[in-house]
Amino acid sequence: MGQSKLVELEVIELDGMTLDRYKIDSIVKGDASVSIPEENRNRVRASRRRIEKQINDGKVIYGVNTGFGKLSDIEIEKEDIAKLQLNLLRADAVGVGEPLPTPVVRAMMTLRANSLVKGFSGIREETLDLLVDMINAGVHPIVPCKGSVGASGDLAPLSHIAIVLIGEGKAEYKGELLTGAEALKRAGLTAVSLEAKEGLALINGTQAMTAVGTISLNEAERVGLAADMAACLTMEALRGIISAFESELLAVRPHPELELVASRMRKWLEGSKRITHQGEVRVQDAYSIRCIPQVHGASWQTIQYVEDRLKVEINAVTDNPIILESGEIISGGHFHGQPIALAMDFLKVASAEWANISERRIERLVNPQLSGLSPFLAVDPGLECGLMVAQYAAASLVSENKVLAHPASVDSIPTSANQEDHVSMGTIASRQAREIIHNSARVIAVEMICASQAIYLEGAERDLAPKTREYLEEIREICPPLESDRAISEQIEKLAQFILRENILR
């Protein structure tokens, strides 16, 4: 018997400058491990020396020898400094709700380590090393999804990660739910005892909202590409007019994303015998088809804006207080999640719009008065309902998205006895964005199934463009055409997951 080959993982260096959403995607999937460059280790050691000097010089430093929030005017005795950090993690691990998915937790850990390696937080090298070792070993703290207001950092969710470093809390290791201490032990790791500033350094940041936001953006990109493909299939099913997508026409309104969508769809539809030109079948298509470049393009504009914001945040220091290279320690507001909160609210609306217009195209496919096809795409209408209620499901998801799309960032509830009197709710915005993106994937899955059924009823497979025919085969692997009524709930969900996870259209 041959010896099995070990897969050698890519090693991604966390240097606080070059991490991006694609590298994070590799790390959360377990396709890459992480390491800390020596230059960054030097910065971490130097930062630690600066804070120890300040403590030894008797300086008063927020969160190091004072209480937290409204309690910051209470000084802490030197012999209690370590206990202060321990108490902080225990007091702040108050998250509630279902646990965040493991990929989100891995992204949080990676982002926190990437911020700490910049050398402005005062953490000890051995504590940082344990965080990195947990990522590489697959020790995943259990982090409840709710409990952060998105300012003062994502205190509750990050505390549920940090508390495992001291051997408390709960963690998943190799598929088993364990105590933090047992998970570390099984992975061959040793818990740390925190010293001055370290608890605060581990939990004061925007890494929960940024982690969910980064994963959501990766998924939104795939949903956007799938929306463009679904629109292509619907155009072929309904003999849509390609004239409205011409470059010369779009150039008079020069938003680049309009041409991006149109050029992508022109390329995918190249060679199709189903696509028509103005006047051949009809003069104009309905807005849900004719305005695809304008509507989809606007959502792609938002993707770019969100990516720009996340690029900064992924490699930013969001701690407090900040230990500057000059040795000065300053309390600021970098933990405030407003830049990400607004971006996530924007992403919510943009992702919801892909579903909104998709549902209108679904209606055009199933409504015989609009499509000229069999009612609800049934083989034997009347006896069979066909895809009638699939449109109901899409309508329900679109309506739910409209509720979720209300901006979380417009709300603020003061905390810590009004010391922290404006908060971002950015973590709520991130979680809602991901829920909307998943709902939108389901709506687009329904559109793909409806378009596939329409093409089946028309016997038009051979007339499709090579690219759309290739994608149609992927759809039909998951959801074959309906020859009679059958339950397709699981197939809708499976196709939605395919859209969210696969990058075959990139």
Image (cartoon, helix red, strand yellow):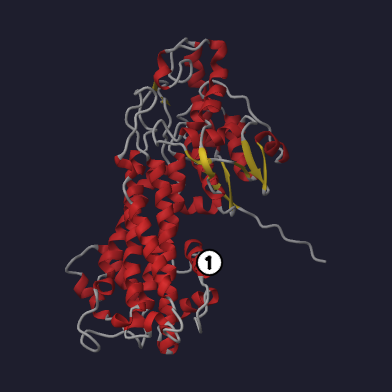
Nearest the viewer among 458 and 229 is: 458
Image coordinates of residue 144 in percent, x first then y, are 53, 40
Which residue is nearer to you in this view: 125 or 244? 244
What residue is rendered at 57% in x and 23% in y? 86
Outermost residue on the front side: it is: 383
Residue 254, by quadrant, is: bottom left
Q: Residues within 10 Å of mark 1 (few under 14, many from 20)?
A: some
Q: In this picture, is 316 found above or below 248?
A: above
Left-right relation of 191 to 494: right
Extreme residue in the right direction? 1
Would you say 416 lies left or right of 161 here? left
Front in this rendered view, residue 413 or 32? 413
Q: Locate the N terminus by quadrant.
A: bottom right
Q: What type is the residue that disc 1 sits on?
A: Lys
Q: Residue 361, position in %: x, y?
A: 33, 73
Residue at horizontal 27 percent and vertical 80 percent from the top: 242
Residue 485 position in % (x across, y down): 50, 79
Judging by the rendered image, the residue that carries numbered circle 1 is: 494
Question: In which image quadrant can residue 132 be found?
Answer: top right
The location of residue 347, given as percent across then percent down, is 35, 53
29 lies left or right of 263: right
